[in-house]
Amino acid sequence: MNRTRVVVIGAGIVGAACARELALAGFDVLVLDRGRPAGGSTSHGEGNILVSDKGPGAELALAQLSARLWPQLVAEFEPRAAAATEFDPKGSIVVATTEAGAAALLAFAGTQAAAGVRTERLDAAAVAAAEPALTREVTAAVHYPQDAQVQPAGAALALLGSALHHGARLRTEAEVTGARVEGGRITGVRVAGEVVAADVVVNAAGPWSGPVSARLGAPIAVRPRRGEVLVTTPMPGVVRHKVYDADYVGAVGTGSGDLQTSAVVESTRGGTVLIGSSRRRVGFDDTIRPDVLGAIAAKAVRLFPALANAAVMRAYGGFRPYVDDHLPVLGEDPRLGNLWHATGHEGAGIGLSAGTARLLRELLTGEQPSMPVDEFTVDRPAVLA
């Protein structure tokens, strides 16, 4: 039986999720990565699966779809892979420390609740019980029980392993340098002097999707946006949920290329505490700047005073695939047939990967999509600018 040959460019979590869905649907899938699996943005994330940071609209709908899919995915993995994902539906608590911030947070939570997000306002006693180490200077707090966390590299490798188990193949150290085009349709990609034939090509290269798309002859405006994270030595029990200040939503949504910071604090299963976050556009400059780390740490200490004496064992940074209108890019390229894009998730790619992959499979197989995808199309001004 002839099967549709799909080349997925990128073995990060979005590419891995897409490869798995397509392999399960019967496609002949080959994943190409310029380095190693989960070696780019995926391994430099915090592992967030969030609905709490998205206002009503298409991205929130995709987050809600993904939040429903993640527990199902983990349940389908073989036990060792499932354990490696460290899936933890621990929920988030978003806090404000000013009266203006409280009003904005509660108004935002109200719009989310109307869109089907579970929100629970916490009073001072409930906040203290949920997070004993949190500052008492909280003017409002909202609990989001649908938020979860995974270990991002572990989750990506579990998805990729499942894809390989179902017939997908993987080539590493295979950078795509160009395309073979026939009759206005892509029929293959160029890798190290050879052409890899394909009936469908999926650009899931994350922050590198822009350069990759240009090499393929159909450029899209996906650019890198850098962020940094501090990691403490183990501090079991100090932070129990993902906790962040209400400024985080504004930092995510800003279009400014200047430095944006907000306090985002959460623990891992091993007890280390992850402290973020920052956003700035600096191209692919991977320099870790002490002033950025200092700004992140200062805001985190205001939320959790106990972190002032924490021992930081490392810091890391990575690039998020940024689009000016802050929406993912998902669909076939109108300029080059058979080329599909699954990218532009910025800092939400870990969580949104599950829903993105499901929608891609549905679109390629002609199924009714699980949700409307019109706002994600490639032919919108922010993508083809």
Image (spheres, grey):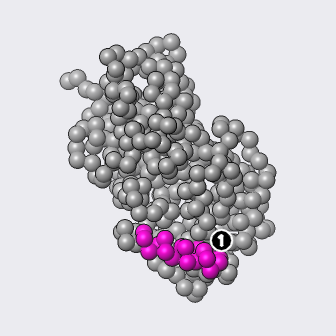
Asked which quadrant contains residue 38, the reply is top right
Q: How many numbered discs sit on the rendered protein?
A: 1
Instruction: Give percent across and percent down for residue 260.
Output: 67, 56
Q: Amino acid at mark 1?
A: Val
Instruction: Give percent across and percent down for residue 272.
Output: 65, 60
Res. 216 visible in picture? yes
Using a 10 Å C-alpha cutoff, classify the residue at mark 1 as few (fewer than 14 neighbours), some (14 to 19) or many (20 or more): some
Instruction: Give percent across and percent down for residue 182.
Output: 34, 15
Question: Is label 1 in a helix, a strand or a loop?
Answer: loop
Q: Determine if the magenta segment contains residue 103.
A: yes
Q: Nearer the viewer, residue 3 or 319?
A: 319
> What residue do we see at 65% from left, 71% from top?
238
> What residue do we see at 47% from left, 39% from top?
383
Q: Which residue is mark 1?
A: 238
> What residue do we see at 37% from left, 42% from top?
377
Q: Nearer the viewer, residue 192 or 236?
A: 192
Q: Is residue 103 above or below residue 325?
A: below
Q: Nearer the viewer, residue 350 or 312?
A: 350
Q: Which residues are magenta?
A: 95-112
